[in-house]
Image (cartoon, grey):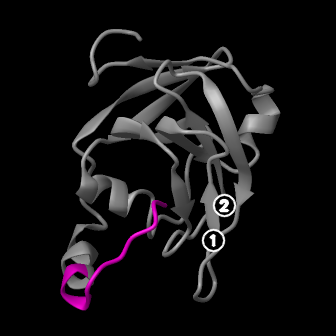
Amino acid sequence: MMKRLLTPALWLLAGCAFAAPHEASSSVQLHGQRFSAEFATDDASRERGLMMRTELAADHSMLFVFADTDQRSFWMKNTLIPLDILFFDADRKLVSMQLNALPCKADPCATYPSDKPARYVLELAAGTAGRIGVRAGDELKIEGALGAVH
């Protein structure tokens, strides 16, 4: 999950949102595989990410969408499942991967940064990227809530 600095009051508010559905949902395609996707397009949904979930189906994902292209760093605080974290540039080309990111068991949590600036970050169940043969330069296609197929 994206690194967050929250005051105790914000943690209480965030705790109320864990079960809330994400505002936008559709699908993405990567390396010939389609995944249903929850889109995290604002600060609140990006902070919440996949926190407190006990599973992520093999054909599901979360796509973090940022307004700019920059170095990204995610962590696994309150994330209960291991994930593959894939970073894409503004052209939706895969520029970096953090595979099998493990849940954080104690503070301080490890961070999982991109090697290059990214605008989109896709989280999949751990092992998925290897299973489908994802490689640097692969294009992410986005369908639905963000507009037509990109």
**Circle 2 crowding by C-alpha within 10 Å: few under 14, some 14–19, many from 20:** many
Query: Amino acid type of disc 2?
Result: Pro
Q: What stretch is highlighted in magenta?
A: 1-10
Which residue is at 27% across, 77% downward? 15
92 over 3 or under it: above or below: above
Q: Is residue 38 left or right of residue 118?
A: left
Mark 1 residue type: Pro
Expressed as whole percent of the image width and height from the top left, the position of residue 139 reads 60, 17
Residue 100: quarter of image: bottom right
Residue 145 drawn in magenta: no
Answer whether residue 139 is visible to the viewer in this image.
Answer: yes
Toward the viewer: 26 or 149? 149
Quadrant of the snapshot with the C terminus: top left
Q: In this view, does 67 lie above or below 31?
A: below
Residue at 59% over, 85% down: 108
- Disc marking residue 103: 1
Q: Which residue is drawn at 48% across and 75% down?
A: 78
Q: Is the C-beta separation of discs 1 and 2 under 8 Å?
A: yes
> In the image, 15: left or right of 86?
left
Image coords of residue 124 (percent x, y): 60, 44
How dense is the environment of label 1, judged by Cα within 10 Å: few (below 14), some, or many (20 and up)?
some
User: For numbered disc 1, what is the local secondary structure?
Assistant: loop
Q: In this view, does 144 lie above or below 149?
A: below
Residue designated by label 2 = 82
Q: Where is residue 17 in the image (x, y as percent from the top left)?
A: 23, 67
Q: Position of residue 32 (x, y in %)?
A: 66, 14
CA distance separating discs 1 and 2: 6 Å
Q: Residue 20 carries which label?
A: none
